[in-house]
Image: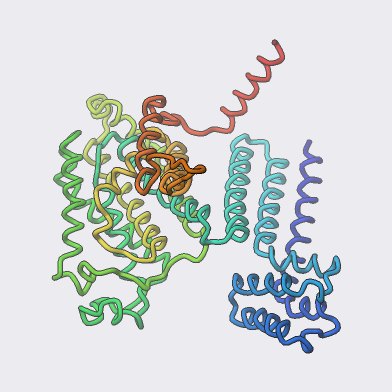
Amino acid sequence: MKTLKIVLAALLVACAVLLLVFSLQARDSLPGILDRMDPQQLADQDTQMKKARDRVDNALLEGDREKTLRSLDRYMEGFREQLTLDSQVQMDLFFFRNGPSMIALALFLLVVAGALVLAAFSRRAKVKKSALYLCLAAAVYAAVYILENTVGGNSMLMTVLKKGAIYALIAVSMNLLNGFTGLFSLGQAGFMLIGAYTYAIFTIETASRNQVYQYYGGGLVQFMLPPLVAIVLAGLAAAFFAFLIGLPVLRLKSDYLAIATLGFAEIIRAVFQYDGLGPITNGSNLLRKFTVFGTALYPFVVAGVCIALIALLIHSTYGRAFKAIRDDEIAAEAMGINLYRHKQMAFVISSFFAGVGGALLAMYQTTVQAAAFTSAMTYEILLIVVIGGMGSISGSVMASFLFVAASEWWLRFLDNKTVIGSFEVPLLRSGFRMVAFSVVIMLVVLFYRQGIMGDKELSLSRIARRLGRRKEGGSHD
């Protein structure tokens, strides 16, 4: 078995190296490919063909890959009979078109090969399990990158994936508070607002500040931070406000805590729109022209790292203390757990990651305005947590993608009038999508009272055991 893993790893490395070599060679090979496609230089004799070829060359010089591919497709479709498309040219075109996807696939194969080698030489079960999860994570990131380069970054699928990743982080951060610590907080939108504004304020280009802060003389902040630094700063700003608010609020319980945190979210939204803070927040005007992510991998990587940190926290001694407080405060205090300190810790940490999620949401939306961070946004996140399961990280992640896909993609057809022959389907009109979505949510809550996952986590070993039991049951039959 050990030899088989090593041989398989070697084959994967060889395939990865070949993919990398062909993909890297094809990156700058389009001019040569175009020459081989037109060996008789027919483009010099045909004006239309020459214009189409020049559009490809100009797009390539601009460095716009999507425009280059569109121009190349038009060139090939319009003059396919005049062009020479032998097998070598087609292979080079394939690697030029799919070079980024092939590089992502090659890196994934290298990760799998490394995991196989690690599993072959290590006898510890934890190491093998970690290698398996590393392969799954690499598969997810490679799939996202390949999809983005295949269907396009502006497609509805990628929109759902980007927003779903951001909502997954915010939902998990809220679950840390509501599901694992038992604190019913409704201030998530307020902390997201703080994170979004902090990120946007510190990443607006200096040359654009006069244009953005046109009513406030260019604003007070006249410098720009790197995006990752600004994201961390956004989380820290949200955590600082959470610490201040938690001093009086965390002594409240149940519904009183929810009302207090909801009040904070509404107050902070009004404060950020106050004209006196305009040189910093731009008042009620939009913040724009700040740094945004150019690939769907960015929110996936940031959200993945943050969710992994939350998972490590939950499985630590602090996480067990949070669960003890949730189950029975009196028993937890009797065991020596400082209730207030641990509640404050959970509140601050949850708010930090909500601030990071707000920064990612600002990057996704490309503009920030305080009026958008209403209590309805908090209710959406709470709904995701409830659907996924209070006390389940994987449930919150799955519910986030399902919620975004259902609300913004799968049910879109219900907003359009549908006519079959002369019969017009009733009710199908603008706004009916949300009615149907509400019914779906009600059905999910009725049939899954503890959510999709309850308080359990998605486990590969549990799935393997269930599959094993089904096979055994089938063999007995």
For residue 314, which quarter of the picture? Answer: top left
Q: Is residue 77 above or below residue 404?
A: below
Residue 189 drawn at (x, y percent): 27, 51
Residues 326 and 440: in front is 440
227 sits left or right of 249 in the view: right
User: Residue drawn at (33%, 44%), measured in percent from left and top?
Assistant: 380
User: Residue drawn at (22%, 55%), measured in percent from left and top?
Assistant: 241
Residues 392 and 420: in front is 420
Q: Is residue 203 above or below residue 121?
A: below
- From where the camera sits, is residue 401 visible? no
283 sits left or right of 397 in the view: left
Residue 13 drawn at (x, y percent): 76, 54
460 sits left or right of 268 in the view: right
User: Residue drawn at (54%, 61%), measured in percent from left and top?
Assistant: 153
- From where the camera sits, is residue 197 visible? yes
Residues 49 and 7: in front is 49
Total numbered labels:
0
For residue 80, which quarter of the picture? Answer: bottom right
Residue 115 drawn at (x, y percent): 67, 46
The quarter of the picture where the N terminus appears is top right
